[in-house]
Amino acid sequence: MAQPGDFATSPADAGVDPDRLRELFDFVRAEVDEGRLPAAQVAVARQGKLAGQASFGRAEQGGVERPVDGETLFCIYSSTKAVVAAAVLCLIEDGLLSVDERAADVVPAFAGQDKEPITIEQVMLHVGGFPGAPMHPRLWEDRALRVERIAGWRLNWPPGSRFEYHATSAHWLLAEVISARTGRDFRDYVRERLLDPLGLSDLWVGLPDAQHGRVADVVYTAARAAPGGELREVNPETILHFNLPSQRRAGCPGGGGFATAAAMARFYQALLNGGAGAGGGRALRPQTIALGTRVRSDPQRHRDPLSGVPINRGLLGVVAGDDGAAPLRGFGDGVSARAFGHGGAGGQIAWGDPASGLSLCFLTNGFASDTEIARRTRRIGTLAAACARPLDAGG
């Protein structure tokens, strides 16, 4: 059932405690072996190096059930948001966009229905006021139909006045922002401007047909107890759409990326290392990443409607914070206040910690209950944070 851990380098050479790393792997192995998940991958990286990765379980891949391994791709759901946000930061770095610009000035179809005041920053922080704006999966592959749908979106409340998670709507608008400012399909821009320079060949927003046979098909392992983290736009129908070739190709920018855990751990390493990939290619400058990881949300007005804690969001995603609420934001115990990342439906985990230099990704093809996800997310994050060795102790 379990594939042995694969160490691209010695964990100690990457500044990672091998015993703690094995403890993390053993926890994930038990989640699969004890039947809570059908399959999973986990990877940890530090100091620009992949310290280790492991794959467990079996999954339908290309119509054949077989063991997952380090080459298996998983849907990363809303962890995709950080990738698309990084591409938007590329626009900002290249002088093609400002976070203070009004979205309707960039995408004229978005104007109307009182949406004109909404800024790019508000869209990226999920405070634009259109969380449930519809974009049915059947529209995902047709840009003209997507723009037509965007034109009809209405506000739920005044922009900036409150937070509610925009499961897909905000990032479909950001995809159109990318296309409007570059004249290119957003998927091509993400690939060529961001992922290729970083050498991330196993991270995709818009999965080519030739890669579909590597994907672990999504399965439900439990009914969800109640609408939660991903909110109303994520439901069984939506999740299972990611088993369809058309939806894999579409690259839903708010939740339809595909990757290996190692590729996502390396993505966060690039962000931690000033925008440079392991091979020396660069996609962003350090000051641009600092712009993306600074908390911009208002701690009073912008609180999670479920947990009640401030959302602590920057342009790139969620920041752990120093208020003791990091586990409620998708991190474990032991990360620094500066850790940042973005999880995904079903319990996907992806983050990097500037203080330790460590990055983590956990992926599964099983969609479990919210209570299971919360338990697992905290434990995996805590175990991963403990992997970082003091740098004066051989790291």
Image: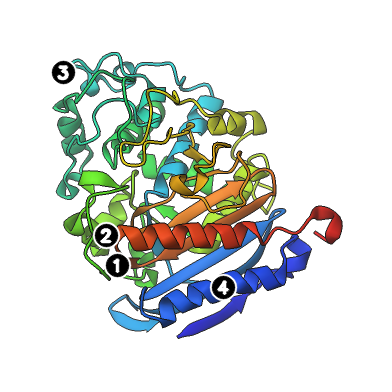
Q: How many labels does the image show?
A: 4
Which of marks 4 and 2 precedes in the sequence? 4
Between residues 79 and 303, which one lies in front from this camera angle? Answer: 303
Q: How crowded is mark 1: few (under 14 residues within 10 Å), some or many (20 or more)?
A: many
Which of marks 4 and 1 precedes in the sequence? 4
Who's the residue at 40% across and 31% down the image?
Answer: 124
- SS for tag 3? loop
Task: Give coordinates of residue 223: x percent, y percent.
Answer: 21, 64
Q: What residue type is labelled 3?
A: Gln
Give the number of the mark in front: 3 or 4. 4
Q: What residue type is labelled 1?
A: Val
Above-or-below relation of 312 to 345:
above
Q: Quadrant of the N terminus?
A: bottom left
Q: Mark 4 points at which residue?
A: 25
- SS for tag 1? loop
Give the distance between the C-alpha atoms of the residues marked 1 and 2, in whole angstroms. Answer: 7 Å
- Which label is found at residue 242? 2
Give the distance between the C-alpha atoms of the residues marked 1 and 4, in whole angstroms. Answer: 22 Å
Q: What residue type is labelled 2?
A: Phe
- Which label is found at residue 74? none
Q: Name the residue under label 3.
A: 113
Q: Which amino acid does label 4 sit on?
A: Phe
Q: Name the residue under label 1.
A: 218
Is residue 259 in view from this perspective?
no
Task: Give coordinates of residue 327: x percent, y percent.
Answer: 49, 49
Give the distance between the C-alpha atoms of the residues marked 3 and 4, in whole angstroms. Answer: 50 Å
